[in-house]
């Protein structure tokens, strides 16, 4: 279960979760397009269908998918700002449903007893409280999916809807 916090000014989301796997394994799960496709999504909600990544500072990434509720397409894209495996990944986040809002996601992986402490800091929501709320709820699900994938091998296909 993740520890969660939306900053008082609703500019940033901060989450922390303990994962029973070493940082290099967690880093692979959050940066390898083949692995991301296996765990990011939920039957009955949405599924990712394509993921590309040029994993280097200045490189770009893009995720595409469809909503299971109405079949509509979506995408999220961004640019890698910092890449320091297996301890740090920072990138911009621009979603097809977010208008022109560009935010920044910082994944920080710290070795811990029994695995990894993963901290996410997603900032840039000033003036967009509804977007902050939606992303807060989304990240809570995403971290649980990733944790299930890394610790138990759960995938979109095998995870109960």
Image (cartoon, rainbow, N blue to C red):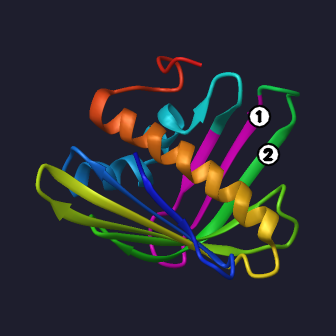
Residue depicted at x 63% and y 58%: 136
Q: Is mark 2 on a helix, strand or loop?
A: strand
Dominant secondary structure (helix, strand or loop) of the stretch shown in magenta: strand
Residue 137 percent coordinates (x, y): 64, 50
Contact check, label 2 and label 1, Cβ < 8 Å: yes
Identify residue for label 2.
74
Left or right placement of residue 26 versus residue 111 in this view: right
| Pick the front one: 59 or 131 | 131
Left or right placement of residue 85 versus residue 120 in this view: left
Residue 115 percent coordinates (x, y): 18, 51
Query: The magenta stretch spans which residues?
Result: 50-67
Residue 71: say if magenta: no
Q: Alpha-carbon distance for marks 2 and 1? A: 6 Å
Residue placed farthest to the left in the image?
113
Q: In which quarter of the image is the C terminus?
A: top right
Identify residue for label 1.
66
Residue depicted at x 43% and y 42%: 146
Q: What element carries label 1?
A: strand
Residue 129 percent coordinates (x, y): 78, 70
Residue 30 percent coordinates (x, y): 43, 52
Left or right placement of residue 147 versus residue 8 in this view: left
């Amino acid at each position: 279960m993740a520890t969660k916090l939306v900053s008082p000014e609703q500019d940033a989301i901060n989450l922390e979760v303990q994962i029973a796997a070493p940082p290099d394994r967690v880093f692979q799960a959050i940066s390898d397009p083949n692995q991301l496709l296996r765990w990011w999504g939920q039957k009955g909600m949405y599924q990712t269908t394509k993921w590309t990544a040029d994993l280097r500072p200045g490189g770009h990434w893009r995720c595409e998918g469809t909503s299971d509720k109405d079949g509509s397409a979506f995408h999220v894209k961004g640019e890698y700002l910092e890449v320091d495996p297996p301890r740090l990944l920072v990138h911009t986040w621009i979603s097809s449903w977010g208008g022109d809002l560009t935010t920044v996601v910082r994944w920080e992986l710290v070795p811990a007893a029994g695995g990894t402490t993963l901290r996410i800091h997603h900032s840039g929501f000033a003036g967009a409280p509804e977007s902050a709320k939606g992303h807060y709820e989304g990240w809570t699900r995403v971290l649980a999916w990733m944790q299930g994938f890394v610790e138990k091998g759960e995938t979109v296909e095998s995870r109960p809807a």
